[in-house]
Image: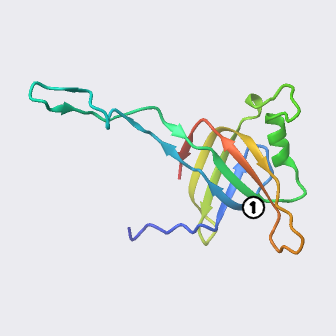
Amino acid sequence: MADDELLVGCRFYFEADGLTDKMILEVSGLTSECPSAGGDKVLGSTKNAKNLRQAAPTRVKFSPVTVKVVATTNKDLYKWYEDCNKNEGGQSNWQSNRKAASVSVYDQGGAMKARWELQNSYPTKYEGPKLEAGASDVANETITLVHEGIKRVQ
């Protein structure tokens, strides 16, 4: 434990193939779950009325990842969403627009200390900024990504 550095939740970065660098406000959903089967159910009983239970892993489930970034004049995040999901109908190109994406956390010296990679991700939801007269908040854009796997590689 003495050699482990605590990661600070305010130095992180989102990347996806072909997109310009994004300043992140918030990331959530970096979740992988392997629910068990059979652990809460009786699978059988013996002559002595002892119940048989066995918990066994099932298929891994991945949660959608939500990324909120600072809005700029660059529209590539929305363009990626639009390329994958045609709002007005027609052929969507989600399969050919899947991207490798990642979330990285940096230490105070600027060195990467943790990284989660998303495999074959694409956006299923786009949300523009909440605009309010007199507000002092930075405008933001939010995308929700689905993916085929998540790995912590660092």
Q: Position of residue 148 (x, y in %)?
A: 60, 35
Q: Residue at x 52, y 38 (%)?
A: 61
Place residue 145 in its image quadrant.
top right
Q: Is residue 120 left or right of residue 5?
A: right
Which residue type does callout 1 highlight?
A: Met
Place residue 123 in its image quadrant.
top right
Q: Residue at x 33, y 32 (%)?
A: 38
The N terminus sits in image quarter: bottom left
Q: Position of residue 30 (x, y in %)?
A: 57, 50
Q: Residue at x 83, y 36 (%)?
A: 83
The one nearer the camera, 49 or 8, is 49
Q: How many marks?
A: 1
Q: Which residue is mark 1?
A: 23
Determine whether 66 is above or below 119 in the image.
below
Q: Is residue 16 left or right of residue 114?
A: right
Q: Residue at x 63, y 53 (%)?
A: 103
Q: Secondary structure at mark 1?
A: loop
Q: Position of residue 70 (x, y in %)?
A: 79, 61
Determine whether 137 is above or below 141 in the image.
below
Q: Is residue 9 left or right of residue 69?
A: left
